[in-house]
Image (tube, helix red, strand yellow):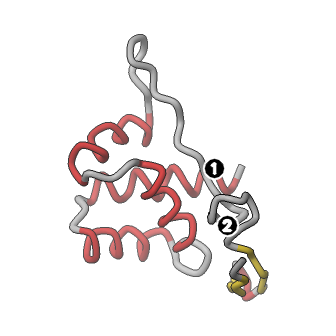
């Protein structure tokens, strides 16, 4: 188990374990929605998820985990810029991922 200390809003520090769920993810994991094979299309940021998987060749859950970890100590647009610069992601896809994670963490 790896313990790391992060700074949150207002400089508050918290310790999180990379093994809180037994799968290597931190305690603030946001899970990808189950997208129906048929029926109504997803709305909002989740509507981008099938395209993100096809375009970048990685499961959405991997992207959500990266974004959730990055949001510990970076602002929304900083994470969007990081996804664009480091992973070659388009602005709409990056913004959809960050928006989805932020909404889930704020709930």
In whole angstroms, how far apart are the C-alphas of marks 1 and 2?
15 Å
Q: Residue at x 24, y 43 (%)?
A: 54
Residue 101 found in image quarter: bottom right
Image position, residue 51 (x, y; %)? 27, 40
Q: How many marks?
A: 2
Residue displayed at 59% across by 81% down: 73
Q: Is residue 14 left or right of residue 66?
A: right
Question: As drawn, is 50 to the left or to the right of 4?
Answer: left
- The residue at 40%/50% (across/down) is 96
| Quadrant of the rendered image containing residue 48 | top left
- Disc 1 versus disc 2: nearer the observer: 2
Which one is in front, 27 or 100? 27
Residue at the image point whose x is 47% and y is 59% from the top: 98
Element marked by disc 2: loop
Q: Bin the neighbour count of mark 1 within 10 Å (Cα to Cα): few under 14, some 14-19, many 20 and up.
A: some
Q: Position of residue 13 (x, y in %)?
A: 77, 86
Q: Are marks 1 and 2 in contact (CB under 8 Å)?
A: no
- Image x and y of residue 66, in percent: 48, 66
Residue 24 in the image: state x and y as whole percent: 63, 65
Mark linked to residue 91: none
Mark 1 highlights which residue?
Answer: 104
- How crowded is the residue under tag 2: few (<14 C-alpha within 10 Å), some, or many (20+)? many
Query: Disc 1 or 2, which lies upstream in sequence?
Result: 2
Q: Which residue is mark 2?
A: 26
Q: Is residue 7 above or below residue 37?
A: below
Can you say whether 64 is above or below 70 in the image? Answer: above
């Amino acid at each position: 188990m790896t313990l790391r200390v992060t700074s949150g809003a207002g400089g508050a520090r918290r310790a999180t374990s990379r093994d809180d769920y037994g799968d290597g993810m931190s305690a603030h994991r946001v899970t990808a929605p189950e997208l129906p094979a048929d029926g109504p299309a997803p709305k909002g940021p989740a509507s981008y998820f099938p395209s993100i998987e096809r375009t970048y060749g990685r499961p959405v859950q991997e992207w959500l985990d990266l974004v959730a970890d990055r949001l510990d100590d970076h602002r929304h647009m900083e994470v969007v810029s990081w996804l664009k610069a480091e992973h070659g992601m388009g602005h709409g896809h990056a913004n959809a991922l960050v928006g989805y994670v932020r909404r889930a963490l704020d709930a």
